[in-house]
Amino acid sequence: MAVLIETQQKPSLNHLEKNPRTILFSMLDNVLSLSDQKIHAKGNSDSQKRSWARVLVSAVGVYGALLKDSDLESLEVRLQRLERGEKP
């Protein structure tokens, strides 16, 4: 029962609702694509390209953090199943 309540509290583990993390991944994909386009655009100044490069680096960092969180939650669920004696 406690696992069900905990699952409902963590949107990323509740597969019946939209996953905010999936939405964030999609948004970050768009940011990464746009940043890459702006960095390689011929009309932008070096200053603008550096600004877009900073956006790109920041977005990559956030993307990595989200992946790490997702992996940790998956491991948490797997550990809970193992502790209950369920097969993985």
Image (cartoon, rainbow, N blue to C red):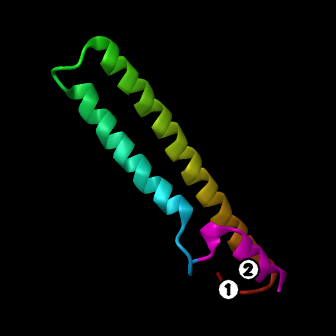
Upstream in sequence: badge 2 or badge 1: 2
The residue depicted at 67 percent of the width and 86 percent of the height is: 87
Amino acid at dot 2: Arg
The residue depicted at 46 percent of the width and 39 percent of the height is: 60
Q: Where is residue 72 shown, x and y percent of the image?
A: 66, 58
What segment is highlighted magenta in the picture?
A: 1-14
Magenta span contains residue 5: yes
Amino acid at dot 1: Lys
Q: Where is residue 31 shown, x and y percent of the image?
A: 38, 42
Q: Secondary structure at mark 2?
A: helix
The residue depicted at 38 percent of the width and 25 percent of the height is: 53
Q: Main secondary structure of the magenta part?
A: helix
The residue depicted at 54 percent of the width and 67 percent of the height is: 19
Q: Secondary structure at mark 1?
A: loop
Q: Are marks 2 and 1 in contact (CB under 8 Å)?
A: yes
Judged left or right of residue 74, residue 61 is left
* Frontmost residue, 62 versus 27: 27
The residue at which mark 2 appears reads as 81
Magenta span contains residue 69: no
Relative to 17, does residue 54 appear above or below in the rendering? above
Q: Please identify the quarter of the rendering in which residue 50 is found.
A: top left
Residue 38 visible? The answer is yes
Q: Residue furthest left?
A: 42
